[in-house]
Amino acid sequence: MKAKAGCGPQSDPEFFDALNELFAQYPEAAAKYAIKCMSIELDGLKIDFGRQVGVSRIEDGRIITEFVDRGTTRGGNCCAWKHDECIQECEPWPEM
């Protein structure tokens, strides 16, 4: 028997139907965004996004994310939001 997905269209079909309608309504904005399941951060790493923020950087062709206490980051562009709160920032990109 196949286990039910914990995240995604199979587990939250109404949410994804509404999201698809919204993305269709704003295609240019939709091209900049993706929906990410946060189970690895919440369930696996037990990140408290009220207290911590992820800071991502590009290193050797990989995206590395570390979680630090809020207020200790050097700023940067927000690249992930949860309920209008920045939960992940990006360090400035290296020259490519």
Image: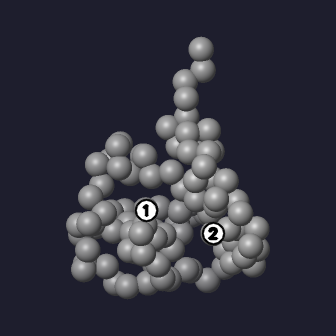
In the displayed structure image, the side of residue 4 where residue 43 appears, left or right? left
Nearer the observer, 76 or 78: 78
**Cβ atoms under marks 1 and 2 closer than 8 Å:** no
The single residue placed furthest to the top in the displayed view is 1
- Element under disc 2: loop
As shown in the figure, which amino acid type bears the numbered disc 1?
Answer: Thr
Report which residue position mark 1 lands on.
65
Residue 61 screen position, x and y as percent: 61, 63
Quick check: 86 above or below 6?
below
Residue 90 visible in the shown view: no
Residue 56 screen position, x and y as percent: 45, 68
Disc tally is 2
Question: Front-most of 55 and 23?
Answer: 23
Residue type pointed to by label 2: Tyr
Q: Residue 91: which numbered mark, if any? A: none
Q: Residue at x 29, y 49 (%)?
A: 46
- Residue in the picture at 47% in, 78% down: 78
Look at the picture and state if 19 lies above or below 81: above
Q: Which residue in the protein does label 2 denote? A: 33
Cα gap from disc 1 to disc 2, whole angstroms: 18 Å
User: How many other residues sit within 10 Å of disc 1, few (<14), some (14-19) or many (≥20)?
Assistant: some
Q: Quadrant of the C terminus?
A: bottom right
Quarter of the rendering containing residue 13: top right
Residue visible at 43% across and 67% down in the picture: 82
